[in-house]
Each structure stands twice: as structure tokens, then as C-alpha cells.
Image (tube, rainbow, N blue to C red):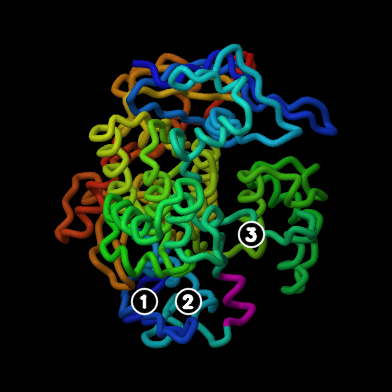
Amino acid sequence: MTLLTVENLRVTFDTEAGLVEAVRGVSFALGRERLGIVGESGSGKTMTGRAVLRLIRPPGRIEADRMVFDGEDLMTADDAAMRALRGHRIAMVMQDPKYSLNPVMKVGAQLTEGLRQRDRIPKAEAQAKAIEALNAVQIRDPERVMEAYPHELSGGMGQRVMIAMMLIPNPDLLIADEPTSALDVTVQAEVLSILDALVRDRGMGLIFISHDLRLVARFCDRVLVMYRGKVVEELAAKDLMQAKHPYTKGLLNCLPRIGGAREPLPALNRSADWAL
Amino acid sequence: MALIEIENLTVHFRAKGHLVRAVEEVSLAVDARESYGLVGESGSGKSTILRAICGLAPVTGGTIRIAGETIPEPRDRAFAARVQMVFQDPYGSLHPRHTVDRALSEPLAIHGIGDTDRRMQEALTDVGLPSAFRFRYPHQLSGGQRQRVAIARALMLKPEILLLDEPTSALDASVQAETLNLLNRLRAERGLTFLMVSHDLAVIDHMCDRVLVMQHGRAVEELTRGDLAGARMKTAYARSLFDASADRML
């Protein structure tokens, strides 16, 4: 079943220096699966994720032939309809907990804010839901974390709090933008298994945005490789090692590997026609 | 005799009223022209060891010797001419309002070394930057170019030892490859000794002959490159780190 369909998505910024095309005609369809979007910085992967939620401010413009989420046209939905979708049905986990949590609000207050304001849920009930969400992301002492300010949490805890926050409304689609890049490898493994369980148990769709090709290959079902605002290759994650596009191959080859040869790493020679 | 000898190094400091035990009795020895890695998760104290060597963190206990001599307190010019550091964040480690020219000429001016023009050209060529970059500001450079400038700056005084603190973790994969190749080439050409910190086992494996695994400020296990690639680690922690990095074998 298709949850999200995106056809020919374009994100353009009018700047003083002229038009900057951040996303140039991206199309994909997503079911209840794990879709990875990989690319280097500036490839448009974050902009693609934000465009789905229409979270791009002027001078940025979003255009698409079609962008439909569960029967609802995201291109024509008015602001009220988008607000009803955001967080509730489509949630986004941002890259850095340091900048995405409110530094002067206790974690508990941030977790329950949406429930209290939007859903008018009584305080005690909202608290219980928040604690349940913190448990779901394997935070051991949720009561203490509820009373903590973001600066009192480590990077891994902050990231898990953000994931918990996005899970409270039980969304159908989660867009996770580099959710594990700031984390240590062992914590990263934990966060990935949490996300994995959510896709499996709740039947959630996941768009996993990352610069780390090998991580995405290990974790996702399908991978879109982006280069300069375009999808240059789409493939099943298990076939990554048989990638055909020279950019994907080049990206894989230039990574050092454990037990690899000591010779210089092959450089990625970019060809002008990849961007065409 | 090893070039860098660290014996029972302990670093404690106070932060917000708490005593932070960043490094606890860590010993290691790095031979001349060797490349030695420190690996561990955040808070394991790996960067603090580098910072303690160059005087950016207090040495609470233990000794650090370079070529058999205990390092001076405070670090003097002779030390700076011998040991230089490259930091993780190329955005934070260059002064935003100083041109490349100024960043590179400062060490020469401090050490009273003339011949600035020629040395500057040489340094830029060495790290693969066109000489037109000399009068640019950091914001006019990409992340990889900035890291090249930081490496050039560290090499201005022709040091023997480079302390590398996650030099490529802020860079894209293709730029990381170029930077690692550059560091390896410079090490071979100049006979440099590296002490390198990274959280990425693949980077450490590619760059280092030996690696020390750290956790909570303590040394857990020292591995040779062969031990690492062959998964011959003895401690559970080193093993769990290795297992979590399984995709780095691909």
C-alpha cells in the first residue's frame, strides 16, 4: 500500500545570485517500509524531507506534479490542513537535539505540550503518555528525564527524546533527518533498533535521510542516492554493492574499510553529466 | 625509545562544580614515524589526551615525554615547533576574520621565521590548494578546503608530531578520502608521527598501525592493525565496538 507518492518534486530558492535549485525533479513512492535517502552535503536530501511537510520558507518554493499522502494532496492542502498533518500523521526528527529542543523548557513540558495544547488532554494523562513514549525509546529513568532540561542530557539521550516526542501522536510516516549522525556507534545501534521496531510493530513508514551510505544499506529496505538535487540511482539496499551508477560506486569506493588495503583511497571524480 | 611516551596520565578538572575524571591513568608509547590511533565513544577521554599533550587540558597526574624529555609547563615555542594539532571542526578552528594568509603566517611571525612568501606558497602547494586561495577568508572555502588550510597551518613550523583530533569527521565521504590521502602522503614525505583520534574504526584502521581502545577515561585494550581487521580483541568492550561497526567492513 502506498502511503506517500511524490512526483517530480522541485525546491527552488530565489536568491540575489539567481535561482538555486536544491531539489530538481525527485519522484518516489513509499509504503510502510524503510526508505533511505543518501547523498553528500548539498545534495538536496534534507530539502526533500522538509518539502514533504511543506516546511520550506520563502524565498524557497516547492513545486511538484503530485505529492499525495494517504489520499490527501499535500500541494493543495491549506495551512490548517497541513498543521493537522504535521506531527500528527507525518512527523520529522531533526538532525541535532542541541538545536531542536527548547533549551529553557523541561523535557517533560516539551513532550506534553502538543498533547495538552492540541488534543486538550488532561495533565496527568499527558504525563503518562510522555513517560510511555520515553520507555519506548529505552530511556531507563523517564521520570528523571521528564524533569531535566535539554542541556542535562547527553547527545544520545537528547536524540531519543526527540524520537519519543515524534512518536507520541503515533504518526503514519516518520521522516528522520540524520537521526544518528551525532551518536556513538553503540547508541546508534540502539536508536536504529528502536526505529526498526516502530516500522515493524506499528506499521509506520520511514524516510531515513543520511550521508552514511553503509549505514543506510544495513538499515533500510530501499535506497535513493541523490546528487545535486536529483536521484541518480534507486536500488534495493541489499543490492548496494552491485550499484550501477558511477556516483554510487565512487561514494562506496572512497570509504576506508576495516581490513582494507593501505593504498590511497580512490578519489571520486565527478562527471558533469551526473548533474544533468 | 619511543618518541611520545605517556605514563599513567590522569586528567581531572572541575566543570560546573563537578569533578570530571576525563582521563584515568592511561599509558601509551608511540614510536617515531608511527601512526597511533585512539578510538572510543564520546566522553571516553580520547580527545582529552591530545589536549593534555598540547596544554589545553590540565595534567593532574602522570608524565608526558617527547623524545625522552618531560614536556615543559607551560608549553614553550620549541614544543610548538615540534608538536602541532589539527582539530575536528574546520569551521571552528580558523579565525573567521583572518585570511588564509594571516592564519598561515602567524606561526612564522611568532617564531621569528622569515621567508614567509616562499613558505606560504610551499605550504599551500603541499596541501593541494591553488595559491589564489591565499587571500580568501574561511567562509569563502568549503569544509574540505578549510581542513586543508588547518593542516597547512599545523605544518608551517615543520613539526615532527601531528596530533589529529577527528580530522575528517565533519567532512563528506569523498572529501574525507582526499584528506586522509593527503595526511598519509605528508606523513610519508616528511616522516611525521601521528597520534590520531577518531570514533570511526574504518578510518583508524586505514590510518594507524596500532590503536588504543578507550572507555570512560580508561584504556581498555591496545590492538595492532592486524588484530583489529582479524577481530582478535580480548575485551568485551572492544568487541562490542567492533560489532557495532560491522558495516565498516563492507
Within-10-Å neighbours for mark 3: few <14, some 14–19, many 20+: few
Magenta range:
B75-82
Q: In the rendered structure, which amino acid carries the disc numbered 1?
A: Val
- Report, in whole angstroms, how far the alpha carbon at label 2 lies from the one at label 3: 19 Å
Q: Residue at x 45, y 50 (%)?
A: A120
Q: Quadrant of residue B197?
A: bottom left
Picture coordinates of residue A269 (x, y %)?
56, 25
Residue on which disc 3 sits: B92
Within-10-Å neighbours for mark 1: few <14, some 14–19, many 20+: many
Picture coordinates of residue A146 (x, y %)?
38, 65
Within-10-Å neighbours for mark 2: few <14, some 14–19, many 20+: some
Is any part of residue A21 visible from this angle?
yes
Where is the N terminus of chain A found, in terms of image quarters? top left
Q: In the rendered structure, which amino acid carries the disc numbered 2?
A: Ala
Q: Is residue B150 above or below residue B60?
A: above
- Report, in whole angstroms, how far the alpha carbon at label 3 lies from the one at label 1: 24 Å
Q: In the rendered structure, which amino acid carries the disc numbered 3?
A: Gly
Chain letter belonging to callout 3 = B
| Residue toward you, A83 or B47 | A83
